[in-house]
């Protein structure tokens, strides 16, 4: 479980990737895959095992967290 805390509101995308020789994306799912985190608030990211059989060996994968900043809308006007 990861815990994310931001100082400004933003959107997060979480992606799970395989490492060469290991296939973890078929064993795990990420919840929530995308979320909005308000300023000074926390967001937990959980990894849930989708396969019912218990693991016999350790698996290695990579987690990518991508941030999308919330931008203010800009109003533009033109005159001729």
Image (spheres, rainbow, N blue to C red):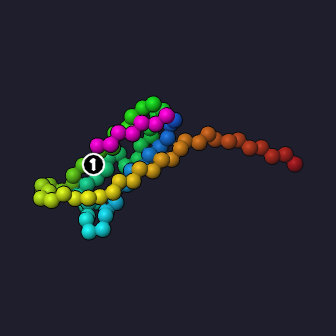
Graded by Cα atoms within 10 Å as few (under 14), some (14 to 19) or many (20 or more), the crowding at tag 1 reads some
Question: In percent of the image, x 45 and y 40: which residue is there?
Answer: 36
Q: Quadrant of the N terminus?
A: top left
- Report the side of 72 relative to 60 (left or right): right
Q: Is mark 1 on a helix, strand or loop?
A: strand
- Coordinates of residue 77 in the picture (x, y in percent): 77, 43
The structure residue drawn at horizontal position 46% and vertical position 36%, both measured from the top left corner, is 6
Residue 22 lies in what quarter of the image?
Answer: bottom left
The residue under the point 14% across, 57% down is: 55
Residue 58: % across, % down:
18, 57
49 w.r.t. 39: above or below: below
Which residue is tagged 1? 47
Left or right: 13 in relation to 70? left
When asked about the image quadrant of residue 15, the answer is bottom left
Viewer-closest of 35 and 19:
19
In the picture as drawn, the residue positioned furthest to the right comes out as: 80
Image: 36 above or below 65: above
Q: In this view, does 63 lie above or below 71?
A: below
Q: Magenta part of the protein: which range?
A: 1-7
Q: Which residue is drawn at 41% across and 50% down?
A: 65
Specify whether 58 is left or right of 18. Answer: left
At which x and y percent is residue 57? 15, 59
Is 13 contained in the magenta span? no
């Amino acid at each position: 479980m990861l815990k994310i805390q931001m100082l400004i509101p933003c959107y997060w995308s979480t992606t799970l990737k395989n490492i060469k020789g290991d296939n973890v994306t078929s064993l795990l799912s990420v919840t929530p895959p995308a979320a909005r985190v308000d300023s000074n608030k926390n967001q937990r990211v959980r990894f849930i095992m989708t396969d019912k059989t218990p693991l016999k060996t350790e698996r290695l994968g990579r987690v990518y967290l991508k941030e999308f900043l919330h931008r203010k809308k800009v109003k533009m006007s033109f005159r001729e």
